[in-house]
Amino acid sequence: ARAGRPGGAPPKGVLVLHMDFWLRPSFFQGRTKNGALDSDRPWLLAAGLNRPPSETVKEYRVFGRACLSDDELDANDEWTWGHGVRGIARGAWRRAVPDKPPVVCAAWADLFYLPRSTWKAFSDLASDAFSSVHHEVGVATALRALEATGRAPPPVPLDCWGCAQAWARDPVQTRGAGDLVCGPSHVDCVSSVTRRRGAATR
């Protein structure tokens, strides 16, 4: 992150996101200014991970941000948990928080915010214990590890429209705009361009 304008205050935090989001910067600016979004806490998308259709699970499922203990993690089938990520994330937790039972979290990680106070601690975890953990699990679990060790407050959940997988159904349909659209159910942070196209529906 850049150091801020010459003579100005340093940035309070950094917003990390994919380039295929539609966002209204004024939404975040207004919400942080009036205190509805706390810029001293991390932010994570509340949902967006979706289970693919299968022969055994017919209904559509959305996996919101959740943190699971060992037993809960083994039993969970709301998301795919592919590529051996359960075991990899458990191992990362044990390295980062050796004195607490493993907890593994998952969240749609294509947009998240880190306040300045967390940069060093998060960077240390991301480059060491969590360096091999898939980002949809690694970001959320690393933030939980920081919370568990008193180095970060709990994240603020951002309730946005959008999805991380092509098979998901979503109330916002994009055309040629990438696979992700971020905006809460009241549509305040969806791009005005998207709304003019009639792509956002209640």
Image (tube, rainbow, N blue to C red):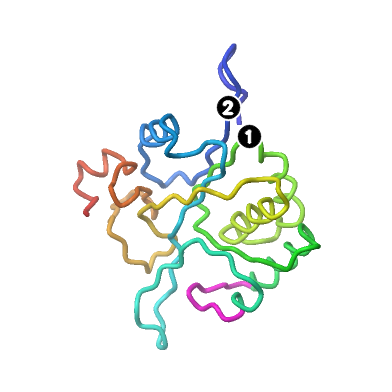
Task: Check whether the beta carbons of the residues at disc 2 and disc 1 lie within 8 A of each other.
Answer: yes
| Residue drawn at point x = 56 percent, y = 44 percent | 42
* Residue 78 highlighted magenta (yes or no): yes
* Residue 177 highlighted magenta (yes or no): no
Numbered label attached to residue 11 = 2
Against 80, residue 137 (above or below) is above
What is the crowding at mark 2: few (fewer than 14 residues within 10 Å), some, or many (at least 20)? few
Left or right: 92 in relation to 105: right
Residue sticking out furthest to the bottom: 56
The residues tagged by marks 2 and 1 sit, at their Cα atoms, a distance apart of 7 Å
Nearer to the camera, 54 or 148: 148
Q: In the image, residue 138 lies at what x, y percent?
A: 63, 58
Against 71, residue 43 (above or below) is above
Q: Secondary structure at mark 1?
A: helix
Q: Which segment did they paint magenta?
A: 74-83
Numbered label attached to residue 116 = 1
Nearer to the camera, 3 or 31: 31
Q: Quadrant of residue 151?
A: top right
Left or right: 151 in relation to 28: right
| Residue drawn at point x = 63 percent, y = 52 percent | 143
Disc on the earlier residue, 2 or 1 = 2
